[in-house]
């Protein structure tokens, strides 16, 4: 945790810090001091991000891209069925594990699951192969997701996994099922899974069309931009998440944000401009191509990325269980909000717990 009174002790020997730690500490302190200047009467902490220790597991897709899974092991003696958590657009695995002992990852661990936090070729941990070409959401769904599931199956000993996706992480589940026929999902909980898009103004539709023209190889440095904006965020409402406490919202911007890749933004922009979740060509309606599945859909009331009705075709297609959240839940609130534990995490844990037997339904003995 960093507050306005915390500065690095530069009297200590230089060897005490490595270069990255020193720059990170100086950056946090500069942002904290800026926030204190902007909010002199606010005595709350600048940010909260006391992250839990995670084990890093590497996986490699069939086209050479490498990325990470971050593992939060099950409690000793627990059944340890694997749950994969997939973050949304512009986020990272920290959206589920921003603070030790708090968040969806910790709630699932407490319920006896082994948790795997997915990152992919669109995240900062990714390593591209020589000569790598720009990529789309389709590539993440049909290459990274299967490779990550291979790694989880290998590591956990279970033949199937449970899945929780937020925003783009939910849409990745849809594309993976529709395009690749991935059948190792035992049951899945999808938070704000927009599949239909109805821009409220022609300006938004035009913005989508403009974004669709971005060069595929561009990387938009939104992680740095969000970090620089942290001193200007007084509360969660400033980031479309009114139920999220201010220090936690700032912690997420500083430590949980990710960059955006041109090919991904182009495909998402096409969805917005044309109104439907499709493949990268725009010809395949993903919802219409989905096979049967065991699914729960969690609907925030004030998420601009998944407004009223945006997930309805998916719910109808799959006969999904629905969790309608009360008023006041925005984009990050299902993960970081003050009421997320009771309103979101508990129903997700209950749903996945009721279907945990499906994880081992192929009859193999699970490694504990």
Image (cartoon, helix red, strand yellow):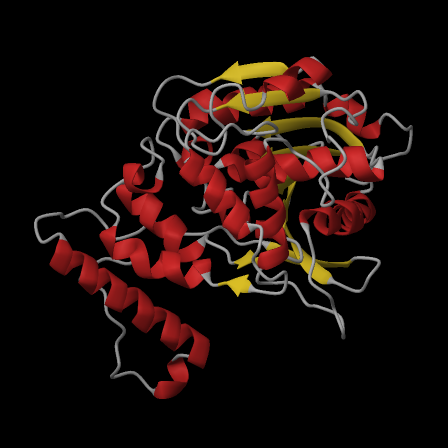
Q: Is residue 368 left or right of residue 39?
A: right
Task: Name the residue nearer the viewer: 76 or 195.
Answer: 195
The answer to which image quadrant residue 359 occupies is: top right
Looking at this rendering, what residue extends furthest in the right direction? 363
Q: Foreground residue, 308 or 81? A: 308
Where residue 86 appears, as percent x and y from the top left, is: 61, 42
State the image coordinates of residue 181 (x, y, percent, origin top left). Answer: 85, 35
For image coordinates 51% across by 42% down, the residue present is 96
Residue 34's place in the image compared with 84, above or below, is below
Tell me, yes or no, if residue 232 can be seen here. Answer: yes
Residue 83 shows up from this direction: no
Q: Is residue 220 left or right of residue 85?
A: left
Judge by depth and name the residue closer to the eye, 198 or 9. Answer: 198
Q: Report the side of 163 relative to 2 (left or right).
A: right
Q: In percent of the image, x 82 and y 36: which residue is there?
A: 182
- Quadrant of the snapshot with the N terminus: bottom left
* Rendered location of residue 195, percent (x, y): 61, 29
The answer to whether 315 appears left or right of 4 in the picture is right
């Amino acid at each position: 945790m960093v507050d306005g009174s915390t500065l690095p002790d530069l009297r200590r020997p230089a060897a005490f810090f490595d270069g990255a730690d020193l720059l990170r500490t100086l950056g946090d302190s500069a942002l904290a001091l800026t926030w204190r200047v902007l909010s002199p009467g606010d005595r709350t902490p600048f940010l909260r991000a006391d992250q839990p220790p995670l084990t890093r597991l590497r996986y490699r897709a069939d086209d050479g891209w490498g990325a990470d899974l971050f593992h939060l092991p099950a409690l000793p003696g627990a059944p340890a069925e694997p749950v994969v958590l997939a973050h949304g657009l512009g986020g990272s695995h920290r959206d589920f594990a921003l603070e030790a002992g708090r968040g969806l990852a910790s709630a699932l661990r407490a319920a006896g699951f082994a948790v795997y936090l997915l990152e992919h070729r669109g995240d900062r941990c990714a390593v591209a192969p020589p000569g790598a070409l720009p990529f789309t959401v389709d590539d993440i769904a049909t290459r990274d997701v299967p490779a990550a599931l291979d790694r989880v199956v290998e590591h956990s000993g279970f033949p199937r996994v449970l899945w929780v996706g937020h925003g783009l992480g939910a849409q990745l589940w849809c594309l993976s099922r529709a395009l690749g026929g991935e059948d190792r999902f035992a049951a899945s909980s999808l938070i704000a899974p927009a599949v239909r898009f109805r821009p409220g103004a022609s300006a938004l539709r035009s913005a989508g069309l403009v974004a669709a023209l971005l060069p595929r190889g561009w990387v938009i440095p939104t992680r740095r931009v969000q970090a620089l904006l942290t001193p200007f965020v007084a509360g969660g409402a400033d980031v479309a998440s009114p139920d999220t406490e201010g220090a936690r919202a700032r912690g997420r911007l500083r430590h949980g944000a990710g960059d955006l890749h041109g090919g991904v933004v182009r495909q998402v922009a096409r969805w917005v401009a044309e109104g439907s979740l499709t493949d990268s060509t725009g010809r395949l309606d993903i919802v219409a191509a989905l096979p049967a599945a065991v699914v729960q859909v969690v609907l925030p009331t004030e998420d601009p990325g998944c407004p009223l009705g945006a997930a309805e075709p998916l719910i109808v297609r799959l006969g999904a269980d629905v969790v309608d959240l009360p008023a006041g839940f925005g984009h990050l609130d299902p993960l970081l909000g003050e009421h997320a534990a009771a309103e979101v995490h508990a129903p997700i844990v209950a749903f996945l717990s009721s279907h945990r037997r499906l994880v081992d339904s192929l009859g193999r003995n699970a490694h504990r």
